[in-house]
Image (cartoon, rainbow, N blue to C red):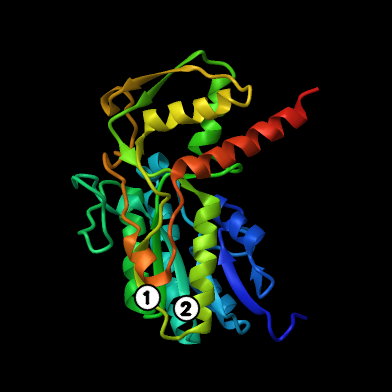
């Protein structure tokens, strides 16, 4: 039995980068309950409805998603089931329970053609199945539960899961040179920082029925191309005795993928700062923390 002062929070995607950090960082006032994929089928609207109605949750955080961007191009139904219909079911169930819903979304709802940072009310125009399905989920949340926050983020990295930092460090072990795309720009963002943002928003929404709602952007401060990002990762890695391959800049045309990527994934986080007082830290500071953690872990494993 939990204390009457402890609020139960239902979290999906607890094994992902952001979900795992939410569980790790959650304050004692929140008891995070995170069913696994085996325990909760996100394409089963009836199961979602039953779970939300099963106990007096204080809020739901939906971090779960189908994130295999390239695979989604040929797995349309599965992607839409997880990214659009799952959020629709949560939005309906949380509205009926009269509790807030925090939903994690993505820069892929934009086509990347804007010259500058995207703000929340810029027109969405996804260019692939993943982005379209995530935009569908946003529409479902937006229309079904007025007490929602849609948190768009991008270029998520952390010491765990599959992400760009870990991929670069792994490739560096066997390749003296790497070719990395230089004509896509975005904002590298720490899963730890996203989780802290979610928990700040959560505390406000649970305590205040009039807390600000709607779509928000959260990314770490600053920008980079994938190539610049890779070079910074290896600069940080080199300072810690890890391999530092030479990184060659290439255009997207030389690295074809089934799904098109937005050329511009830069998001403006000013609205979140104004409404919730959250100021992102620079991405280099956040990423250096991740590289340091991974380097320390590797040194422990060495004989």
Badge 2 marks a residue whose secondary structure is loop
- For the residue pair 186 and 163, the one nearer the viewer reads as 186
User: Can residue 6 be seen in this snapshot?
Assistant: yes
Name the residue: 50% across, 85% down. 97
**Image quadrant for the N terminus?**
bottom right
Q: Earlier in the sequence, mark 2 or mark 1?
A: 2
131 relative to 241 in the view: left or right:
left
142 relative to 159 in the view: left or right:
left
285 relative to 300 in the view: left or right:
left
Tell me residue 225's x, y (percent).
Answer: 34, 34
- For the residue pair 56 and 18, the one nearer the viewer reads as 18
The residue singled out by tag 2 in the image is 100
Q: Are marks 2 and 1 in contact (CB under 8 Å)?
A: yes
Mark 1 nearby-residue class (10 Å; few <14, some 14–19, many ≥20): some
**Image quadrant for the C terminus?**
top right
Name the residue: 42% across, 80% down. 211
Mark 2 nearby-residue class (10 Å; few <14, some 14–19, many ≥20): many
Name the residue: 46% across, 69% down. 102
Tell me residue 261's x, y (percent).
Answer: 31, 40
Is 87 rendered above or below residue 129? Answer: below
Name the residue: 28% across, 62% down. 120
User: Can residue 86 be seen in this snapshot?
Assistant: no
Which of the 4 image quarters holds residue 29? bottom right
Q: Residue furthest top?
A: 176
Residue 42 image label: none
Which of the 4 image quarters holds residue 59? bottom right
- For the residue pair 178 and 260, the one nearer the viewer reads as 178
Tell me residue 235's x, y (percent).
Answer: 50, 26
Badge 1 marks a residue whose secondary structure is loop
Residue 213 image label: 1
Tell me residue 63's x, y (percent).
Answer: 50, 60
Q: CA distance from mark 2 to mark 1?
A: 9 Å
């Amino acid at each position: 039995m939990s204390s009457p002062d402890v609020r139960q929070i239902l979290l999906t995607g607890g094994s992902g980068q952001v979900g795992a950090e939410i569980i790790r960082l959650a304050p004692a006032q929140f008891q995070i309950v995170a069913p696994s994929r085996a325990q909760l089928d996100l394409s089963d609207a009836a199961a979602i409805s039953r779970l939300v109605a099963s106990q007096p949750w204080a809020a739901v955080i939906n971090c779960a998603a189908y994130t295999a961007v390239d695979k989604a191009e040929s797995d349309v139904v599965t992607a839409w089931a997880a990214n659009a219909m799952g959020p629709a079911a949560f939005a309906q169930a949380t509205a009926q329970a009269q509790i807030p819903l925090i939903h994690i979304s993505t820069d892929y709802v934009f086509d990347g053609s804007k010259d500058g940072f995207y703000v929340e009310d810029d027109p969405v125009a996804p260019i692939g199945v993943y982005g379209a399905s995530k935009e569908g989920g946003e529409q479902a949340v937006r229309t079904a539960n007025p007490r929602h926050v849609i948190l768009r983020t991008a270029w998520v990295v952390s010491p765990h899961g599959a992400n760009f930092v870990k991929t670069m460090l792994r490739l560096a072990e066997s390749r003296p040179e790497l070719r990395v795309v230089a004509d896509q720009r975005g904002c590298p963002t720490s899963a730890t920082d996203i989780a802290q943002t979610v928990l700040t928003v959560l505390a406000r929404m649970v305590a205040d029925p009039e807390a600000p709602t709607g779509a928000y952007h959260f990314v770490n401060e600053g920008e980079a191309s994938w190539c610049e990002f890779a070079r910074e990762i290896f600069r940080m890695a080199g300072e810690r005795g890890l391999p530092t391959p030479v990184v060659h800049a290439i255009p997207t045309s030389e690295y074809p993928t089934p799904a098109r990527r937005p050329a511009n994934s830069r998001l403006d986080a000013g609205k979140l700062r104004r409404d919730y007082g959250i100021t992102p830290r620079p991405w280099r500071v956040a990423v250096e923390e991740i590289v340091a953690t991974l380097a320390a872990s590797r040194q422990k494993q060495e004989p």
